[in-house]
Image (spheres, rainbow, N blue to C red):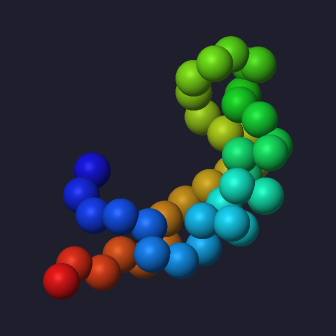
């Protein structure tokens, strides 16, 4: 992983993280389908 989150972290936490993890484990894919649609490298 490179870089850092510069915006949208609050939306990530409230919509994706709060949904939990598939299978109810401590690590894995989120229950809510998620995709990175853009990235900027400077």
Residue 24: x and y in percent read 76, 19
Residue at image position (71%, 31%) is: 21
Q: Nearer the viewer, residue 23 or 3?
A: 3
Q: Quadrant of residue 30?
A: top right
Residue at image position (27%, 50%) is: 1
Residue at image position (57%, 23%) is: 27
Tally the numbered discs: 0
Residue 10, compared with residue 16, is above or below; it is below
Residue 31: x and y in percent read 75, 39
Residue 28: x and y in percent read 57, 27
Residue 11: x and y in percent read 71, 67
Residue 25, compared with residue 29, is above or below; it is above
Residue 33, compared with residue 6, is above or below; it is above
On screen, residue 18 versus residue 38, left or right, reads: right
Q: Quadrant of the C terminus?
A: bottom left
Residue at image position (72%, 28%) is: 22
On screen, residue 30 versus residue 4, left or right, reads: right
């Amino acid at each position: 992983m490179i870089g850092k989150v510069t915006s949208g972290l609050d939306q990530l936490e409230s919509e994706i993280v709060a949904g939990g993890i598939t299978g109810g484990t401590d690590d894995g894919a989120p229950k809510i389908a998620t995709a990175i649609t853009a990235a900027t490298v400077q």
